[in-house]
Amino acid sequence: MKKLRVILLIAGLLLGALFILPLLIGVWLPDVISAPEHTLAEQRLASGHSFRVVQYWNRVDFYSTELRVTSPGGSTETHTLDGDDSKSWRLPLVVDEQRQTATVTLGGGRVRKVDWR
């Protein structure tokens, strides 16, 4: 019985380390395995324009973070905010409809401003 507890403890520690160690360098292990796309911020204007900040594991070097602007007609423009970003769970998105700009603040306070005319 004691041997089983030791084996379970070691297995638990190894499994925990498998998820925690990659986080120390900013990588969420499930993203590496399946590379899903995560929406970090989203906003829709009365004019019909919609804005989405998405992030995904780019299978090369960390995460790609993009702003996708969809016009009322359905066409989408993609703006790369950072092609070598660290993992984010949420990001602030501020859209100025008068100036037609979208501002996203990435991790570390890095600000990216996009004109969406």
Image (cartoon, rainbow, N blue to C red):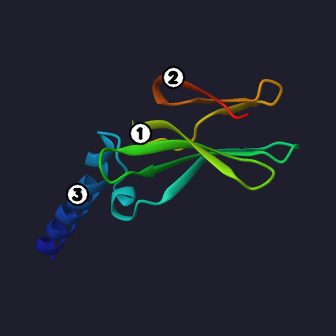
Chain-order first, disc 2 or disc 3: 3
Give residue 100's position: percent from left, percent from top.
76, 29
- The three-letter amino acid code for the residue at tag 1 is Gly
Q: Is residue 84 left or right of residue 10?
A: right
Vertical arrangement, residue 31 with respect to residue 49, above or below: below
Provide the secondary structure element on which disc 1 rests. Answer: strand
10 Å crowding of disc 1: few (<14), some (14-19), many (20+): some
Q: Quadrant of the N terminus?
A: bottom left
The residue that appears at 25% across and 56% down in the rendered structure is: 18
Q: Nearer the viewer, residue 46 or 75?
A: 75
Give the Cα separation between the discs numbered 2 and 3: 34 Å
> In terms of image quadrants, where is residue 87?
top left
Q: Give whichever of 27, 60 is nearer the camera.
A: 60
Residue at the disc numbered 1: 83
Sequence-wise first label, 1 or 3 = 3
Between discs 1 and 2, the one toward the N terminus:
1
Q: Position of residue 3 (x, y in %)?
A: 11, 72
Q: Residue at x 58, y 37 (%)?
A: 91
Q: Quadrant of residue 53?
A: top right
Most foreground residue, 69 or 85:
69
Which numbered marker is on residue 61? none
Q: Which residue is mark 2?
A: 109
Q: Classify mark 3: residues with Cα within 10 Å, few (<14), some (14-19) or many (20+).
A: few
Q: CA distance from mark 1 to mark 3?
A: 33 Å
Q: Return the residue at label 3.
A: 13
**Residues at discs 2 and 3 in contact (Cβ within 8 Å):** no
Q: Amino acid at mark 2?
A: Gly
Identify the residue at horizontal 73%, vertical 34% (top origin). Answer: 117
Front of the two marks 1 and 2: 1
Q: Alpha carbon of mark 1 to alpha carbon of mark 2: how far?
A: 16 Å
95 left or right, relative to 11: right
